[in-house]
Image (cartoon, coloured by chain):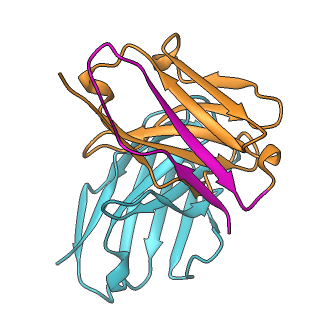
């Protein structure tokens, strides 16, 4: 069974950083891409970035450049999302999702991680 | 690419037909358009990719159509489990973008 299991909910102060994880199982990790997306309450999902699980190359959405880093650990089949300088506008559910090629639809999603940024 | 979905809310009864629209601000090449279903507290689920192809395990009452800038998701006969929010998404160019969603609610 193909699964993406994400880390637990987090509460952060404004200005802090966060690091979320997404552990893949049930398929060949390095044959796919992993994306990070987020969804604020009442909004559609917003794409943040992508990592090639094989070579580790990344691309980020322009609005997150300089503030986001996506990495992967092939020994544990895990992808990480780091986001710095958090504000209340970063409060959202964060999802990882898989694609078989770079430019195709997201076929498998993680269950999501709730992140709350509040003073 | 900005995706505009209409209507915002669709109030229908089980057994009725649902027609959801997604309009793109720019031409989407290679029919790089997907539809997802999302229920409260759950992640989105892929229904349709490449505008017309059903994802694995998706019932044939779901169908997609369209090309260029105008796309449609049709649910031929609504089942109780189909009441949810539906999003379109383009993966033609970066950044990948989603519409704001259409909520299909029970009338």
Observer-nearest residue: A47 or B73?
A47
**Residue A93 visible (yes or no):** yes
Q: Name which residue lies at 36% across and 50% down.
A: B5
Can residue B17 be seen here? The reply is no
Please state which of residues B20 and A89 is positioned toward the viewer in this rendering: A89
User: A14 left or right of A8?
Assistant: left
Residue B84, how many percent across, how many down? Answer: 33, 67
- Is residue A104 found left or right of B19 in the rendered image? right
A116 displayed left or right of B62: left
Chain coloured cyan in this rendering: B
Q: Is residue A22 magenta?
A: yes
Instruction: Give coordinates of residue A68: x percent, y percent.
Output: 52, 19
Instruction: Choose between B15 and B27: the one closer to the eye.
Output: B15
Quarter residue B104 falls in:
bottom left
Residue at horizontal 42%, vertical 45%? Answer: A8
Quarter in which the N terminus of chain A is drawn: bottom right
Q: Relative to residue A109, is residue B90 depicted above or below?
A: above
Up the image or down, B64 lies above or below B91; here it is below
B48 inside magenta stretch? no
Q: Which residues are magenta?
A: A1-27
Which chain is represented by orange in the image? Answer: A
Q: Please, which residue is most extreme toward the top here?
A: A66
Quadrant assignment for the C terminus of chain A? top left
Quadrant in the rendering for residue A69: top right
Q: Could you tell me residue B10's position as x and y percent?
A: 25, 66
Residue located at (62% from left, 47% from top): A23
**Image spot of residue B96 (x, y percent):** 55, 36
């Amino acid at each position: 069974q193909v699964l993406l299991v994400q880390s637990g909910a987090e509460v952060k102060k404004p200005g802090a950083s966060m690091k979320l994880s997404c552990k893949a199982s049930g398929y060949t990790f390095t044959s796919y891409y992993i994306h990070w997306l987020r969804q604020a309450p009442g909004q559609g999902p917003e794409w943040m970035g992508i990592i090639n699980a094989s070579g580790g190359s990344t691309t980020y959405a322009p609005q997150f450049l300089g503030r986001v880093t996506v990495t992967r650990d092939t020994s544990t089949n895990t992808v990480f999302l780091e986001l710095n300088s958090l504000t209340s506008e970063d409060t959202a559910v964060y999802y990882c999702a898989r694609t078989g090629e770079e430019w195709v639809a997201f076929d498998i999603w993680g269950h999501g991680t709730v992140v709350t940024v509040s003073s | 690419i900005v995706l505009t979905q209409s209507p915002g809310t669709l109030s229908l009864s089980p057994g009725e037909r649902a027609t959801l629209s997604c309009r793109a601000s720019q031409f989407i090449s290679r029919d790089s358009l997907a539809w997802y279903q999302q229920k409260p507290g759950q992640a989105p689920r892929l229904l349709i990719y490449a505008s017309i192809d059903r994802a694995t395990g998706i019932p044939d009452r779901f169908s997609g159509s369209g090309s260029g800038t105008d796309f449609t998701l049709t649910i031929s006969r609504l089942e109780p489990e189909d009441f949810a929010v539906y999003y379109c998404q383009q993966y033609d160019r970066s950044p990948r973008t989603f519409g704001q969603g259409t909520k299909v609610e029970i009338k």
